[in-house]
């Protein structure tokens, strides 16, 4: 099987790389220090259609295939992981509405999301709830013709500037999804700062204090919140993060090649030392492997293959762990300079650690991937005619 980008995908890759090199890469460290993403940049991103990348054309989206979407995330991630995370959460909400929203919700919200007229945030995590997302403590009670939300969300990416939030709460004991606009009475936003990595992603805590939202803002049905809506959105999020991890790793490699070509130790350039070449080789191989895993996951999504979800977990697991290892080596190669904000590798290391936690931690991916392997083994090892025998027993 031959895996190769189309000419159209290659041209797009070059186009987005040029955009990143001009508009994002030179300023990423400054945004990281200020913990801020400029509105002008978000406007440029919206004008290029990145916020509606995978939405259908009928809703003003780009209708982008998933491999191209992966390329977009890799290149943006190479420039700034915080900015890439905007693509992640905004498109997660867009896809959730595209798949589970009713016609009225789609017609009203999706064009606005695609054009960047509004920014969306994904509100699942809570102070006491992370990996066990189905156990959210935020509640929704139906009173009259409205839902009353009470609870708290935390670590909400771009929560400081989002206009609309996809919020998950328990209603009648069932995880359920709701759209909440930022101006809703009883809804407040508290900025978070001092985060380890992706500092420019403007994280926030959300507080719901008898926050009343219209019945029409229910997304899907009661009980659909986690197993259907959140799960499918997180699958897109994992793919975006995995591709972004390849971008971080690529940025580390490029920084190391430049640094070792310019700096001398023991009267020779660092690039001439065998141990340096060993680390560079390991970086190259792991980046290529991670990129191909992302392309494979994207291709399977494009053809709606049943293995696309597990292959996305594999890609996210490998790419995030590889990015963290590569970033560690990049700092080591830079020595003392690697611990200084004057060089980008210290930011890459901080950002790469975040990638091992968000959209399903490394440990959750290990559990998921192993469970899938055991299920496949069971199915392939049962005797012929097992479906008929099971039916007879039932």
Image (tube, rainbow, N blue to C red):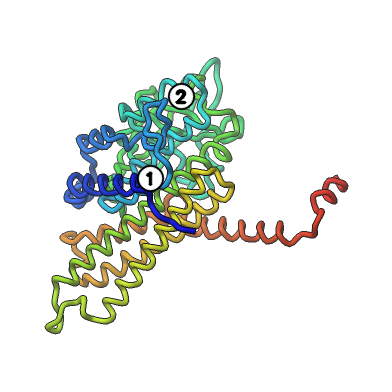
Q: Is residue 146 left or right of residue 6?
A: right
Dot in front, 2 or 1: 1
Q: In the rendered view of the protein, which quadrant contains the C terminus? A: top right
Question: Of residues 60 and 76, which is closer to you in this image?
Answer: 60
Q: Give how far apart the Cα atoms at labels 2 and 1 are.
A: 24 Å
Disc 2 is placed on an element classified as helix
Tell which of 220 and 67 is nearer to you. 67
Name the residue at 37% across, 37% down: 53
Residue 351 in the image, given as x and y percentages of width and height = 32, 55
Which of the 4 image quadrants contains residue 43? top left
Please state the horizontal and vertical placement of residue 208, each as a whole percent of the image: 43, 31
From what the image shows, is residue 261 above or below residue 149?
below
**Image x and y of residue 348, in percent:** 28, 58
Residue matched to label 2: 106
Please indicate whether residue 174 sits to the left or right of residue 296 in the image. right
Q: In percent of the image, x 38 and y 62: which residue is there?
A: 288
> Residue at horizontal 33%, vertical 41%?
86
Does residue 174 sit above or below 146 in this rendering?
below
Question: Residue 68: which numbered mark, if any?
Answer: 1
- Could you say where residue 3 lies in the image, as x and y percent from the top left? 44, 56
In-front residue for pair 204/309: 309
Identify the residue at horizontal 46%, vertical 56% (top origin).
Answer: 315
């Amino acid at each position: 099987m031959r895996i190769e980008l189309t000419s159209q995908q290659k041209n797009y890759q070059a186009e987005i790389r040029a955009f990143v090199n001009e508009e994002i890469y030179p300023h990423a460290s400054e945004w990281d220090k200020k913990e801020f993403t400029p509105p002008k940049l978000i406007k440029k991103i919206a004008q290029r259609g990145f916020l509606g990348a995978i939405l259908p054309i009928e809703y003003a989206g780009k209708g982008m295939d998933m491999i191209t979407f992966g390329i977009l995330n890799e290149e943006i991630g190479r420039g700034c992981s915080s900015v890439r995370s905007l693509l992640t959460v905004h498109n997660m909400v867009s896809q959730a509405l595209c798949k589970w929203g009713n016609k009225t919700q789609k017609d009203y919200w999706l064009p606005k999301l695609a054009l960047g007229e509004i920014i969306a945030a994904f509100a699942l995590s809570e102070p006491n709830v992370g990996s066990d997302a189905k156990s959210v403590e935020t509640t929704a009670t139906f009173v009259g013709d409205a839902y009353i939300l009470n609870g708290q969300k935390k670590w909400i990416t771009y929560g400081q500037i989002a206009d609309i939030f996809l919020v998950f709460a328990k209603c009648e004991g069932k995880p359920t999804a709701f759209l909440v606009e930022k101006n809703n009475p009883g809804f407040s936003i508290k900025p978070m700062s001092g985060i380890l990595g992706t500092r420019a992603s403007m994280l926030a805590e959300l507080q719901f204090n008898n926050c009343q939202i219209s019945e029409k803002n229910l997304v899907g049905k009661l009980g659909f919140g986690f197993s259907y809506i959140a799960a499918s959105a997180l699958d897109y999020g994992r793919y975006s993060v995995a591709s972004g991890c390849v971008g971080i790793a690529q940025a580390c490699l490029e920084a190391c090649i430049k640094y070792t070509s310019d700096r001398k130790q023991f009267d020779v350039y660092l690039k001439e030392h065998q141990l340096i070449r060993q680390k560079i080789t390991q970086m190259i191989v792991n980046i290529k492997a991670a990129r191909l895993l992302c392309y494979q996951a994207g291709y399977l999504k494009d053809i709606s293959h049943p293995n696309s979800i597990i292959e996305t977990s594999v890609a996210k697991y490998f790419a995030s762990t590889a990015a963290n290892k590569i970033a560690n080596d990049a700092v080591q190669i830079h020595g003392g300079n690697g611990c200084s904000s004057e060089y980008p590798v210290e930011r890459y290391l901080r950002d790469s650690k975040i990638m091992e936690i968000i959209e399903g931690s490394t440990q959750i991916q290990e559990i998921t991937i192993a469970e899938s392997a055991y299920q496949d083994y069971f199915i392939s090892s049962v005797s012929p005619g097992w479906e008929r025998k099971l039916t007879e027993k039932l």
